[in-house]
Amino acid sequence: MGLPRCVRLLSVTHGLLSAPRRDLGVHGPEEALPVVRIPRALQRRQEQRQSGRRSSPQPVLARPGPLLVSARRPELSQPARLTLGRWERAPLASRGWKHRRARGDHFSIERDQPLAPALRNRASQDTFANLGLEPRVLDALREAAPEVVSPTTVQLSTIPPLLRGRHVLCAAETGSGKTLSYLLPLFQRLLVQPSLHPGRIPAPRGLVLVPSRELAEQVQAVAQPLGSSLGLQVRELGGGHGMNKIQLQLSKQPPAAVLVATPGALWKALKGRLVSLEQLSFLVLDEADTLLDESFLELVDYILEKSHVAESPADLKDAFNPKAQLVLVGATFPEGAGQLLSKVARPNAVTTITSSRLHCIMPHVRQTFMRLKGVEKVTELVQILKQHDKATRAGPSGAVLVFCNSSTTVNWLGYILDDHKIPHLRLQGQMPAAMRAGIFQGFQKGSQDILLCTDIASRGLDSTRVELVVNYDFPFTLQDYIHRAGRVGRVGSRVPGTVISFVTHPWDVSLVQKIELAARRRRSLPGLESSVREPSPQQA
Ligand SMILES: Nc1ncnc2c1ncn2[C@@H]1O[C@H](COP(=O)(O)OP(=O)(O)OP(=O)(O)O)[C@@H](O)[C@H]1O
């Protein structure tokens, strides 16, 4: 018989369809049972009604397998094999988090790949020697950093144009090896450029400008061993010191061939005629977005004015009238960075390098977001730190960075950790310069396993032994989130990294929702995606 079973079932139950229905155009021997096709959904609803169950939407359970987003409510998890379309909307795990009833909820962006993006897609022929570096520089690198064997993707794309004398704007994710990307070409340039007769005041030939004295200490620590193998002195000039200390630092013998300085200290030294930039051949602005920020812009403008930046690579060839090659480096870039560069150099002399993962959520670091009440944060933190301490006793594990939004919170939280007998270091901007000196370097070397800090430790500081970042206070901006999270999962990291963020305020939730959506779409964070242009072919 050609009749669907459903029709007959319904006909029997209700007697509605049992009469011959000539109007339906059904004839012949089956006239008593007309063919009526009932949509399956209608049929299911009818069956549910009969069995007395209420119809309710079924949760869409994620199929087993690796997840990209794992939520407390499994129906909000997203499998790793799925990527949300650019304009597609999805129910976010953090949706509704502005409501206080969401407290206690949590979700994680899972580790999607084991390796840092800067270590992927490299070919066996990608070696430092093939990039055009001189044997002397290669030997110095081998001696100073034996663990650095083959270049990262950012080093592969930055070193060749710098060796060709081009100005470079390099925007690449945190921990991708940007420091060596500019230091190796800097040393090579100083080796090939003959040094002029020393003048009355110190005149470094290489200058690396950084926004904090911790970063100055760090870059100096990387550059110094390279420089000493090449017979080039590297000195650091950090802020927070008076003129006497600056003078003492600059008058040390032998004079600095390369100076690593903060803008404030260098500005004072220039104003006091303690240093000259007349002989500068290579100028780097590391963490350029911070240096171009309003708080530094006036100082940086003054330093650029004194630096004689070359207009084009041809200008660099005059050995007796040195001009500076310019490099801007950063992991986040505001719009207008390119404009600043074009104020001092011709746009066609600039190569822009951006990594494909710029401004994206790091795919190799697990990032957990916990919606908490403000008063629950301390208990949660203490628990996390005690668990970490237990894990450390059980076997080798890494260090922890805890970020707060203010110096006051760092101090206050420090007293609470003291009460719980949790040993730690503190680093915040209101500490006197003498007290601040060496804290981060000590932490890097393993003097303590926990560092409570403000954002002064979030930019540029290399923290390869850190395995956990806790955002005790959620950062105010997405840029700050990128930099804080970037303290783990670095190229040289010994341990896989995790980030845990406490989310308490409605404005925190707005940022978390943007982060979650970007992760589900595997795209860059909103508002940051267009800030640096992709290099155009004629620039390369
Ligand atoms: N080619 C390489 N091979 C192995 N390790 C490397 C290589 N290049 C750099 N590293 C290591 O990677 C770590 C991160 O490098 P670096 O501090 O230069 O990153 P970055 O991109 O400047 O980060 P940030 O944006 O946070 O400033 C360092 O410990 C460095 O020694």
Image: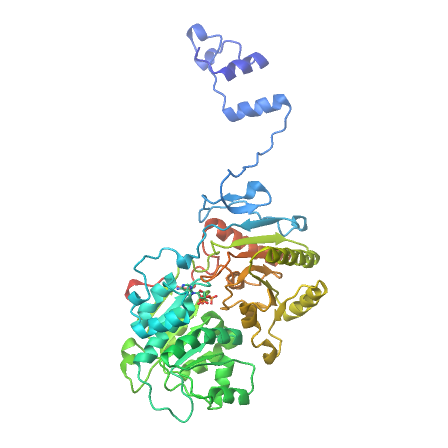
Q: Residue furthest top?
A: 29
Query: Which of the two residues, 136 or 188, is positioned nearer the viewer here?
Result: 136
Which quadrant holds residue 151?
Answer: bottom left
Query: In the figure, 300 relative to 152: above or below?
Result: below
Question: Where does the image place residue 120, in percent across and percent down from the top left?
Answer: 39, 56
Question: Where does the image place residue 352, in percent across and percent down from the top left?
Answer: 36, 66
Query: Which of the two residues, 476 or 140, is positioned nearer the viewer here?
Result: 140
Query: Which of the two residues, 423 or 99, is positioned nearer the viewer here?
Result: 423
The quadrant of the rendered image in which ligand 1 is seen is bottom left
Question: Is 528 on the left or on the right of 415, as rendered?
Answer: left
Query: Could you tell me if residue 12 is visible in this image?
Result: yes
Query: Which of the two residues, 19 or 3, is positioned nearer the viewer here?
Result: 3
Which quadrant holds residue 340?
Answer: bottom left
Which quadrant holds residue 77?
Answer: top right
Query: In the figure, 425 relative to 113: above or below?
Result: below
Question: Is 120 on the left or on the right of 483, as rendered?
Answer: left
Question: Where does the image place residue 269, in percent across and percent down from the top left?
Answer: 48, 87
Q: How is the image coloured?
A: rainbow
Q: Residue furthest front?
A: 394
Question: Is 13 on the left or on the right of 24, as rendered?
Answer: right
Query: In the figure, 510 relative to 303: above or below?
Result: above
Q: Quadrant of the N terminus?
A: top left
Q: Quadrant of the C terminus?
A: bottom left
Question: Where does the image place residue 360, in percent across and percent down from the top left?
Answer: 46, 57
Q: Residue furthest right?
A: 419
